[in-house]
Amino acid sequence: MRSVLFITALFFLARLSAQELPPPAPVTSPLDTLPETMRVFRAQYDNDVFHATDRYYTFGLRGEMIAPAIWKIPLTRVLLSFGRSYDEAYGISLNQRCFTPGRSFSDTIQHSDRPFAGHIYIGFKRISASAEYRVRMTSELDIGAVGPCASCEESQKIFHTWINNEPPQGWENQLVNSFAFDYSTEAEKGIISNDFFELNGHLGLQAGTVHIRGNAGLMARTGRMSDYFMRPAPADHFECWVFVRSEVQGVAFNGTLQGPLFNKGNYHYILSENVARTVFRTDGGLVLAYKMLQLEYRQTWLSREFSGGLPHGWGSVGFSCYF
């Protein structure tokens, strides 16, 4: 299953890259093509409290800035794109992801359960798209660390204090500090599109010290909305749409379960033979947009990631501001 998924993904990405894209604009850099409105700040908060649970992926934060000047950062040169398409955007983000076992109120190691883990990183992103050919590629390089330096123990304890809940125990057994990086790229292709409905397919690959996996799936949107493959911009009028995105993932390595790839100093981790090699994920949500603002709420469902584990879900609240 993993081999078929990875080979299919590589073939799909190669076919998209080989398509004849719109001829390049006569410019010297992406700074000349991106309008002033391409400065966007985005914030996202994830928590499984929206599913009335407190386990596995339990808490996450993402703050992202999209701006033309980010093109000047040298690391963006390694991010894949369609090359000849000038509809591009560049972003930089700060991310925190926190994981706990199914029972986080015991300081005893639960050897058959997911370990405590924190992951913090800076992400560099490049988006390349063509509305005419209905293709989009998103590439990201994430550089950071896994371990106590991610401050997930402190974040979860603060949140539990806010909601007057029992403080978690067991963080002293979390995965140890380790350098972490991941490189990912995902290609999307429009299948069906009209004024009120879109259906797109996607295929992606991710490789690094935290994740080695591939994914394939579909996304559907319906409502009053702008074209998905157009450059992001403020809404001229009120927009509202719902979406569903489902995919299958082929997992070769998951460092939040097994510990980072090159670090063997962890007290507790999931053995490779107990990691689920096929994982199903579905996201569904609602987006409201007007002028310079956009609000999003989504729910995510994930099948079990390891032997003895349970399906899991969480909710996300997102906010975007154009300026």
Image (cartoon, rainbow, N blue to C red):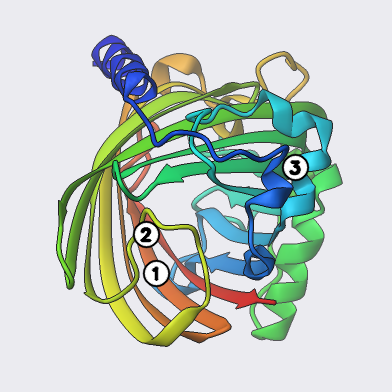
State the image coordinates of residue 150 (x, y, percent, origin top left): 80, 48
User: Between disc 3 and disc 2, whose residue precedes?
Assistant: 3
Which residue is at 78% across, 38% downward? 147
Q: Secondary structure at mark 3?
A: helix
Cα–Cα span, label 2 and label 1: 7 Å
Query: The disc labelled 2 sits on which kind of residue?
Result: Thr
Q: CA–CA distance between discs 3 and 2?
A: 31 Å
Task: Give whichever of discs 3 and 1 has the lower sequence position.
Answer: 3
Q: Looking at this view, name the residue that lies furthest to the right.
A: 149
Which amino acid type corresponds to the residue marked 3 in the rendered image? Trp
In this figure, which residue is indicated by the disc labeled 3?
71
* Viewer-side label of 3, 2: 3
Q: Quadrant of the C terminus?
A: bottom right
Q: Residue at x 63, y 42 (%)?
A: 125
Residue 85 appears left or right of 216: right
Residue 91's disc is none
Residue 92 visible in rendering: no
Residue drawn at x 48%, y 16% as measured from the top left: 272
| Badge 2: residue crowd in 10 Å (few <14, some 14–19, many ≥20) | many
Picture layout, residue 31 above or below residue 164: above
According to the picture, the residue beneath numbered tag 2 turns out to be: 300
Task: Tell me the residue that label 1 is attached to.
Answer: 298
* Quarter occupied by the N terminus: top left
Q: Are marks 3 and 2 in contact (CB under 8 Å)?
A: no
**Quarter where residue 239 is shown:** bottom left
Give the Cα separation between the discs numbered 3 and 1: 30 Å
